[in-house]
């Protein structure tokens, strides 16, 4: 398993949802022309509720890697090779709250036709732009409210229990309002592509960390997802409300001037960077009303300006670019 650098983990945690990442060479990718989402969550539900031997056999034989990831990394309840691990897994999910959660997931997501359609269209567009990309094996699980997205070199797991809707009663016991706002079914498709691209294009290196570099790196990922999914604006990718969009339209110059005048733009202090990049409901520098992930929004805005002035630059070329100083200069955002 590849070790993730601490600061990279910090920036990953600044996003709306949590994600677990590793490398895995043992599973082939899906064919590019169609994307099917494997319902591992239903298989797990069958095993837990019915003590189904056939379901357990499929989990251990046909879904070995998802089962290993769930047991060892998402839930951290033991090792997949332990003699009693199957019973331990069943006991874990036999908790009354988790049984209800699995049942609610089953009712909330009887099928994933629309998601599969969106994934198919999105990956076709992405592979057309970046031919070296491959479609990962995509599956669903119930993670007991742990990771929203699980990502390896060849797998992408979606925890459906983290997308039940912001008004889902159980969420109110464990999450703040600003956290629940992103736990909606309509966020699944966007999150899949955001985390997939962040896995393919991690932040260049720790010795290049500065606020502007972080802003532009995550700004370009969000910009590319906007293009891939045909979103009207990056606001849709970020999940901003109309009020937050209006705030951004009215305050972009103010935010930029504040960063420049206070020497924040090239600062490398992780705590300062976090203030601009974190998903909390209040950005300390700009008070109530400022949206979360304000650095990502402004980074995407600068990227958009750069692409307007460089129409010959493809999405693949943009993704490959790491000279963020040059991007800033040639965006004409400073003018």
Image: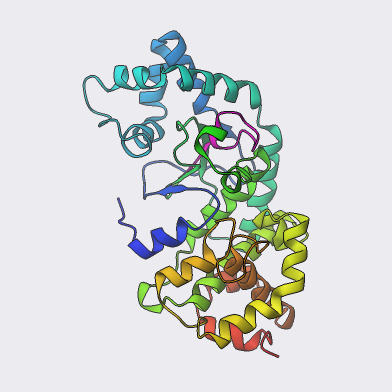
Viewer can see residue 326:
no
- x, y percent for residue 49: 46, 12
Question: Which quadrant, please, contains the C terminus?
Answer: bottom right
| Residue 78 figure quarter | top left
Identify the residue at horizontal 74%, vertical 66% (top origin): 247
- x, y percent for residue 102: 52, 22
| Residue 69 figure quarter | top left
Q: Residue furthest bottom?
A: 335
Viewer can see residue 190:
yes
Viewer-side residue, 283 vs 137: 283
| Total numbered labels placed on residues in the image | 0
Identify the residue at horizontal 62%, vertical 31% (top origin): 168
In this rendering, position of residue 301 left or right of residue 133: right
Identify the residue at horizontal 48%, vertical 64% (top origin): 201
| Magenta residues, start to end | 155-170
Compared with residue 225, is residue 142 higher up or lower down, i.e. above or below? above
Compared with residue 121, is residue 79 higher up or lower down, i.e. above or below? above
Residue 164 falls within the magenta-colored stretch: yes
Viewer-side residue, 287 vs 117: 287
Q: Residue furthest front?
A: 287
Residue 42 falls within the magenta-colored stretch: no
Colour mode of the rendering: rainbow
- x, y percent for residue 179: 56, 46
| Residue 283 figure quarter | bottom right
- x, y percent for residue 328: 60, 84
Viewer-side residue, 66 vs 27: 66
Compared with residue 80, is residue 148 higher up or lower down, i.e. above or below? below
């Amino acid at each position: 398993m590849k070790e993730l650098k601490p600061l990279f983990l910090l920036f990953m945690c600044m996003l709306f949802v949590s994600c677990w990442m590793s490398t895995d060479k043992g599973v082939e990718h899906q064919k590019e022309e169609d994307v099917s989402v494997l319902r591992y969550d239903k298989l797990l539900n069958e095993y837990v509720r019915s003590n189904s031997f056939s379901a357990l056999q499929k989990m251990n034989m046909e879904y070995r890697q998802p089962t290993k990831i769930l047991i060892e990394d998402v839930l951290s309840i033991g090792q997949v090779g332990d003699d009693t691990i199957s019973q331990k897994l069943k006991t874990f999910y036999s908790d009354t709250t988790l049984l209800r959660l699995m049942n609610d997931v089953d009712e909330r997501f009887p099928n994933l036709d629309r998601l599969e359609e969106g994934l198919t269209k999105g990956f076709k567009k992405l592979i057309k732009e970046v031919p070296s990309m491959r479609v990962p094996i995509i599956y669903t699980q119930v993670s007991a409210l742990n990771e929203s997205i699980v990502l390896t070199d060849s797998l992408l797991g979606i925890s459906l229990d983290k997308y039940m809707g912001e008004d889902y009663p159980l969420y109110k016991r464990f999450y703040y309002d600003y956290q629940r706002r992103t736990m909606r079914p309509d966020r699944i498709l966007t999150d899949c592509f955001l985390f997939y691209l962040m896995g393919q294009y991690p932040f260049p290196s720790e010795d290049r960390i500065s606020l502007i570099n972080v802003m532009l790196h995550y700004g370009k990922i969000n910009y590319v997802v906007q293009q891939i999914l045909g979103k009207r604006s990056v606001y849709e990718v970020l999940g901003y409300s109309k009020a937050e969009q209006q705030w951004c339209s009215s305050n972009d110059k103010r935010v930029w001037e504040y960063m420049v005048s206070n020497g924040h733009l090239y600062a490398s202090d992780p705590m300062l960077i976090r203030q601009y990049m974190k998903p909390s409901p209040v950005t300390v520098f700009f008070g109530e009303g400022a949206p979360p992930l304000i650095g990502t929004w402004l980074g995407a805005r600068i990227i958009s300006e750069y692409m307007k002035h460089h129409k010959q630059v493809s999405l693949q070329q943009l993704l490959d670019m790491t000279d963020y100083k040059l991007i800033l200069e040639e965006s004409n955002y400073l003018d």
